[in-house]
Image (spheres, grey):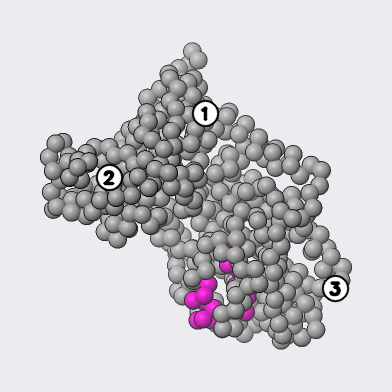
Amino acid sequence: MKKLHIYHINDLHSHFENWPKIRRFLLEKKAFHEKNGEEVLLFDIGDACDRVHPLTEATNGKANIELLNQVPFDAVTIGNNEGIGNDKRQLDELYDDADFPVVLANLYDPETDELPTWAQPYLVKELASGLKVGIIGLTAPLYLSYIPNGWNPKESDEVLPKILLKVAPSVDLIILLSHVGIIEDIHIGEMYRSIPVIIGAHTHHVLPEGKHVDDSLLLGAGKFGKYIGHATVSYDSDRIMDRKAELIEAENLPEEPGDREEVEELQQRGEELLSAIPIADNPVRLKADEGHTNDLLLLGLDAVTEYAGTPFGILNSGLFLKDLPEGTITKNHLHQILPHPMRLLECTLTGRDFKVMIEEMESQREELMTKEITGMGFRGRIFGELCYRGFEVDPETKQVKVEGKELSDEEDITFVTVDHFRYITYFPTIENEGRSRLLFPYFLRDVFGLHLEDKFPITREK
């Protein structure tokens, strides 16, 4: 009986704290198995990039590809942070210098109705033992974000049947690199019995021993480089006999001299690159207060409503993480203040639904002021205080007034906020009733920077 060892990471999100250990472990394991005559494959399942890290922001993710090149990955797929954290041009250039293939079957360019040139829907590898392995890649089809960014995503059921008809008869084992989330992974396991191994991501699920769904073994290694996934496939000739999974905790791997310095250097390099790009000359320091309305938050509301061309805006104080200093403001300042990879969301509701949404917000206002939240693009600590622009809410009656008049039920109102408000569960009316669109290509910090640049320009004398 022969063995194939599969090692995988996913959802690193530019958390490089354990990267030296992860890299060393994967290189050592690859050498160890090959020395013992065993097959080994290495994969990354997407969201390796995250613009929360200054080096990712400064290089549009290309520094992350440099790091991935340090490991001989057999294939990677993309996550939403690669796919929509970059504009179309940036994504088209992201893998120019990659030393590994990108497998991705469900993201199309509407201009050509083809996959992007840097991706292939699947890959067939014939190992030294003669085992033929088909490798397919999928990413989460987030229509609201991908379509305005110039891409046409497709559901797994739209692409998998045709690929499996082509690939399954010619290989002994199919591995799916799946950045679509655990719920869809379960669906795929139930629907497609010809996929014995599904390596999952996106929902950051942790499966210490894997999860069997019919004939499929689902894998998941959490997030942020905390775990390295390892699956062992035992086979005899071309027949799969057994599959087992485990997780290795990266923090417990041995540390070597220079590891911490390497991680710190990545941070420093990013900050230096961003600090070299001046944005504005700010006349007065504005202090951040994550739990309360403040002048920095109000300046942010000025920026987003002006950019969206609507007088109505809603932001939360927890978005602003650091003070805006007096003097020259650089891209590094903006990144530290607003590290979130968030787009602006323009949403139109009827007056009736808008008042329902405000009721949702007001009923949770006190709780949200100190509520710790994570994910869905948010990179802060607490949600903080809700702040409105262009309308008032009577604290007693909860009536919504615009220019002193109560908003009518039939009147439409268009407001701007951040995409986070649609993805979190606190304000369901936005998702259920809103006519929404994301404003591309800029992130919240970019819009804020454009406003500062216009309001407080750097003079040539300075």
Asked whether 408 falls inside the magenta stretch, the response is no
Question: In the figure, is residue 5 to the left or right of 299?
Answer: right
Are the residues tagged 2 and 3 within 8 Å (C-beta)?
no
Few, some or many residues within 10 Å of mark 3 (<14, 14–19, 20+): few
Kind of element beneath mark 2: strand
Q: Label 3 amino acid?
A: Gly
Q: Which of labels 2 and 1 is toward the front?
A: 2
- Of residues 278 and 349, the one nearer the viewer is 349
The answer to whether any part of residue 122 appears in the image is no
**Which residue corresponds to mark 1?**
330
Instruction: Please tell me in which quadrant of the rendered image residue 407 appears.
Output: top left
Q: Quadrant of residue 234?
A: bottom right
From this viewpoint, which residue is outermost toward the top?
A: 461
Mark 2 vs mark 3, CA separation in Å: 62 Å
Q: Residue at x 40, y 22 (%)?
A: 456
Residue where numbered disc 3 is placed: 37
Amino acid of disc 1: Thr
Q: Identify the mark nearer the N-term, 2 or 1.
A: 1
The three-letter amino acid code for the residue at tag 2 is Phe
Q: Residue at x 33, y 49 (%)?
A: 364
Range of magenta residues: 185-201
Distance, label 2 to label 1, CA atoms, is: 29 Å
**Residue nearest the observer in this picture, 292 or 253:** 292
x, y percentage for residue 185? 53, 72
The residue under label 2 is 415
